[in-house]
Image: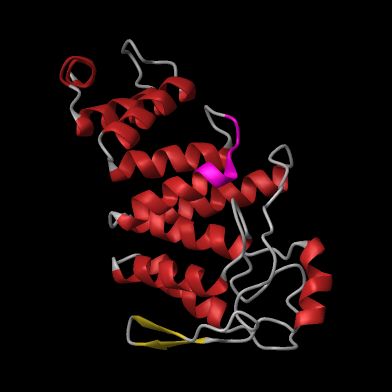
Amino acid sequence: MLRDLAELHSHADAICSYAMLLYSGLPDTAIEIPSPESAYSWHLVAATVHSHPQSQYEVAVAMYMGDGIDEDEAGAREYFRLGAMQGHSAAAYMLGDCMLDGVGGKRDRADALYWLVKAAEMGHRGARSRVLAVLEMEEGRNYGKFTDLSRQTLINPEDEESEEKNGKAKRGEKIKGNKLEEVRNDENINISGSYKGEEDLTSPVVLSRRRTTVNESRREQ
């Protein structure tokens, strides 16, 4: 029935649901064997033709993980943005994470916090704790290879020299209730440069970290 609704009637929700079945497979049916490639193709239809927020998020995840499609960090960030703008909390969470990590574009601490707070305001509890962890950053404190107490955002080694020259990013935002009061100061908040993440998804560590981040975003949808 879902396939008929998707193929014959171009029903957006049916396309998204059918794509999810294709991705996971369904025992004792015609789609018993998962097909990430087919799932991605159907999600892409729902995302582009129907602007379906869940499919926009799923397309972004596929690009982010290189699952069913070649890895495309810039594409993943853009589709996370499209879903976030339609009120998809998990997409907003992932968009904030990409901005913190410099995945698919430059690192932008202020905009990252904006989207993480947006996700929190949509009810994403994980986003709330992430925001608080990010804001716990103390100037001069050694967080190892991470940028803050969240222990999710890795420092790009190529940025370390630049950060030393320009001064470490300082706390430039304040939380009042669930609202983010941004203090825009490019020198102190935004890490300079247009760093594009070049993480190797063949690395088990990188792949595991990304999978964990995606799973965290899904749990709070």
Look at 56% across and 46% down and name the residue there.
74
Q: Please give the count of numbered marks on the rendered protein.
A: 0
Residue at position x 43%, y 68% in the image: 116
Where, quadrant-wise, is the C terminus in this rendering? bottom left
Q: Is residue 107 left or right of residue 22?
A: right
As for residue 73 lying within the magenta part, the answer is yes
- Image quadrant in which the N terminus is located: top left
Q: What residue range appears in magenta? A: 70-75
**In the rendered image of this protein, does residue 73 appear above or below residue 124?**
above
**Residue 120 falls left or right of residue 3:** right
Q: Residue furthest top?
A: 30
Percent position of residue 216, x then y: 46, 56
Residue at x 62% of width, y 76% of height: 149
Q: Residue at x 35, y 50 (%)?
A: 83
Residue 58 visible, this orientation = yes
In the drawing, does residue 51 fall left or right of residue 100? left
Front residue (pair 57, 214): 57
**x, y percent for residue 150:** 58, 71
> Quick one: which residue is furthest to the right in this view?
161
Q: Is residue 220 visible?
A: no
Q: Is residue 221 above or below residue 15?
A: below
User: Which quadrant of the view contains residue 217?
Assistant: bottom left
Residue 199 vs 191, above or below: the answer is above
How was the colour assigned to the protein in this rendering? secondary structure
Residue 160 at x, y percent in the picture = 80, 70
Taking 138 as reference, is 212 left or right? left
Decide whether residue 151 is among the magenta residues.
no
The spot of residue 165 in percent (x, y) is 81, 80
